[in-house]
């Protein structure tokens, strides 16, 4: 099972920016089930739902409706490869086009588009998942269009207008002051209308030859970008391997996954499940598959599932399915036999179709 992902740098970058503002993001990281150790490697991919939970936790922790814009205003240059890609674009237009084309390297949460087929060019941000982009993430993204656009060109330009999907949180005037432009809330998509002339602003120090190299490099990185597996999915795979060995304690499995019991349980809770639930699901799936093989005895099945004796397996299986293991095997065997008989007695098609 895979899910849209984001670079861990997306979280690490925000954590560092919050620190610049005097805000400790540790409680928000704990709330989202993110270990700080994963933030040191930008190649690590986090499930988008985990990043969204982190953003929402920061919103709740700070209680500041403008926290997304404040972090965007104080943001550093950003993801190293992406930073070089933008800073070596000859003009702001090319930089925004690269931003749109390669944004998946940073996040699968949204699609960024530079729309130029109108009188007023626009940058548009649209969610790429069924989940709504949290206000902090939306503000941070749109805010960086402006702050990094100014830094890249060294010019203090202003957008023509802004549209945001979220509500104004009673801070509409503050939003308009921050952008120095009209802002509409509750829009279908987040977008920024740009003065046409700014797209031709040159970016000092850009290297066109290096840009070609970076284009290929970033494209290759995206093509080989690893997908994130849910914690429950990883846990299922490990439990399936460890059942017959009896190495399925919560503490032991958590240690093998490189985390504490509390962290493992917190991550599973965020995915709407528990260790006990996943363990039971794995046992039941393997039991049903094993009972379909008449060459494996009920005693062997009990052993493979980590039960101390067949009677314990008998009680557990009846609790899971409402049937005894023997009844389930007999029913399954009857279904297979009926299918085989039907195959043998089916009329032959003389035409050979």
Image (cartoon, rainbow, N blue to C red):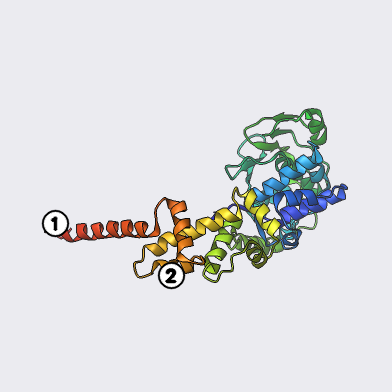
Quadrant position of the C terminus in the picture: bottom left
Look at the picture and state if 175 lies above or below 232.
above
Look at the picture and state if 167 lies above or below 327.
above
Q: Viewed as shown, does residue 343 lie left or right of 10?
A: left
Q: Earlier in the sequence, mark 2 or mark 1?
A: 2
Q: Secondary structure at mark 1?
A: loop
Whether residue 6 is visible here, answered yes or no, is no
Q: Viewed as shown, does residue 78 lie left or right of 48?
A: right
Residue pointed to by mark 1: 347
Residue pointed to by mark 2: 300
- Residue 46 in the image: state x and y as whole percent: 66, 55
Q: Calculate the distance from the C-alpha at mark 2 to the C-alpha at mark 1.
A: 40 Å
Q: Secondary structure at mark 2?
A: helix
Look at the picture and state if 237 lies above or below 14.
below
User: Looking at the image, which is closer to me, 353 or 253?
Assistant: 253
User: Looking at the image, which is closer to me, 15 or 176?
Assistant: 15
Residue at x 67%, y 37% (from the top left corner): 190
Q: Quadrant of residue 78?
A: bottom right
- Residue 336 in the image: state x and y as whole percent: 28, 59
Residue at x 41%, y 59% (from the top left corner): 288
Residue at x 67%, y 39% (from the top left corner): 122
Q: Quadrant of residue 65?
A: top right
């Amino acid at each position: 099972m895979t899910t849209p992902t984001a670079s861990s740098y997306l979280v690490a970058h925000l954590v560092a920016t919050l620190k610049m503002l005097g805000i400790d993001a540790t409680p928000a990281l704990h709330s989202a089930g993110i270990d700080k150790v994963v933030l040191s490697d930008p190649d690590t991919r986090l499930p988008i739902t985990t990043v969204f939970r982190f953003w929402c936790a920061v919103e709740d922790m700070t209680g500041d409706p403008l926290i997304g814009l404040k972090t965007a205003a104080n943001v550093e240059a950003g993801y190293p490869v992406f930073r070089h890609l933008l800073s070596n674009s000859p003009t702001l237009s090319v930089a925004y086009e690269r931003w749109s084309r390669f944004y998946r390297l940073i996040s699968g949460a949204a699609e960024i588009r530079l729309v130029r087929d109108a009188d007023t060019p626009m940058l548009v941000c649209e969610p790429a998942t069924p989940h709504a982009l949290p206000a902090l993430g939306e503000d941070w993204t749109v805010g960086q269009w402006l702050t990094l656009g100014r830094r890249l060109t060294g010019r203090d330009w202003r957008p023509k207008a802004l549209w945001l999907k979220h509500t104004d949180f009673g801070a509409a005037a503050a939003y308009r002051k921050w952008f120095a432009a009209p802002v509409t809330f509750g829009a279908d998509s987040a977008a920024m209308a740009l003065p046409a002339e700014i797209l031709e602003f040159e970016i000092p120090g850009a290297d066109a030859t290096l840009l070609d190299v970076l284009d290929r490099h970033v494209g290759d990185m995206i093509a080989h970008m690893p997908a994130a597996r849910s914690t429950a999915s990883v846990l299922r795979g490990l439990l399936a391997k460890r059942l017959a060995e009896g190495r399925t304690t919560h503490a032991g499995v958590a240690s093998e996954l490189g985390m504490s019991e509390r962290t493992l349980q917190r991550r599973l809770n965020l995915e709407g499940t528990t260790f006990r639930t996943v363990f039971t699901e794995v046992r039941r799936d393997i039991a049903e598959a094993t009972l379909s093989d008449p060459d494996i005895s009920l005693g062997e099945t009990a052993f493979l599932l980590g039960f101390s004796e067949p009677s314990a397996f008998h009680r557990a299986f009846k609790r899971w399915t409402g049937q005894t293991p023997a009844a389930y095997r007999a029913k399954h065997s009857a279904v297979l036999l009926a299918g085989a008989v039907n195959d043998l007695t089916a009329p032959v098609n003389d035409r050979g179709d």
